[in-house]
Image (tube, rainbow, N blue to C red):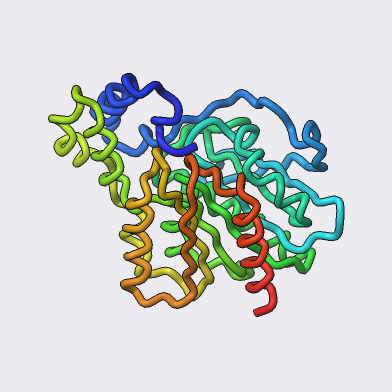
Amino acid sequence: MALLITVFKPLRWPILLMLAITLTACSRPFFYPDQHIRLTPDKIGINYHDINLRAKDGTQLHAWHLLPKTPAKGIVLVLHGNAENISTHIHSVAWLSEAGYELLLLDYRGYGRSQGRPSLPDILQDLDAGAHWLNLRSQSQQLPAYWLGQSIGASLSAYYLSHNKIERLKGVILDAPFANYRHIGREKLSEFWLTRPLQHPLSWIIDNRFSPDKAVSEWPDLPLLIYSSSTDQIIPNHHTEQLISQFQSNTRENIEYVKTRGPHISTYNYLVNRQKTLDFFERQKKK
């Protein structure tokens, strides 16, 4: 669930965004954590372990390690959208466990049972903790490692992976990423009459240093599959295509782009997209 508009009614969120930006002048308006755990994986028939990680600054993080019922084909680090926590985002990716993959579902700081408050750049330390665990698990079990980011988790991933080499990582999937915090913040401010006149000055207060489009020139030689829906109302398709154009301008050959339809991060509601993802994993495994 990406961006605060998934949390608040359309007439409320622009006012809250305006106030949050004015008061904080940072990235916190993009993160809407929820500490309430609505279900655990066993409630939907998945075996799992609670995992506790520690970020470099000492923040305690919580994750779920989902285990398939058959020998694992690989392990996937899953980074969810900006609202709620892993207990609501699990429904989007639980099918991967059924397909034979281990998953690590990480809650960023402030989400679910993870400590702290989410903001940039601190939240990048959380990705670092997840990446470290992924590498160790991949090595100890001799499993190929994959990375799946959705919505803001996809945008965080694009920036992070452009600056950090994950030794055993085979491939990356970005589901509905946006390219630039300032651009999408300005667009959301423009959608409501009260904040429309202030969209430009307020957008310049948004911390834009960690936008993916500022980093993809450093993207490693790492296979990438990007999904985006042409009917996404939360992160309109042109924000994803802006990021794709940045990748393409750097002549990266290992990029696949799949344009889908449907609501925001409903990609895996469709069997065709599940199969595309499984095929992507298998292709990278053989390399």
Q: Is residue 210 visible?
A: no
At 38% from the left and 34% from the top, the residue drawn is 28
Q: Quadrant of residue 217?
A: bottom left
**Side of 46 where 171 appears, left or right:** left
Number of numbered discs on residues: 0
**Side of 155 where 207 appears, left or right:** left
Q: From the viewer's perspective, is residue 215 above or below residue 232?
A: below
Q: Is residue 19 visible?
A: yes
**Residue 104: x and y, percent?**
67, 49
At 61% from the left and 40% from the top, the residue drawn is 61
> Residue at the bottom extreme?
287
- Locate the C terminus by quadrant: bottom right
Q: From the viewer's perspective, is residue 113 above or below residue 287?
A: above
Q: Nearer the viewer, residue 61 or 44?
A: 44
At 26% from the left and 26% from the top, the residue drawn is 23
**Residue 93: x and y, percent?**
65, 46
**Side of 124 where 277 appears, left or right:** right
**Side of 185 where 3 appears, left or right:** right
**Residue 143: x and y, percent?**
74, 66
Q: Nearer the viewer, residue 82 or 276?
A: 276
Q: From the viewer's perspective, is residue 127 above or below residue 197?
A: below
**Residue 1: x and y, percent?**
50, 37
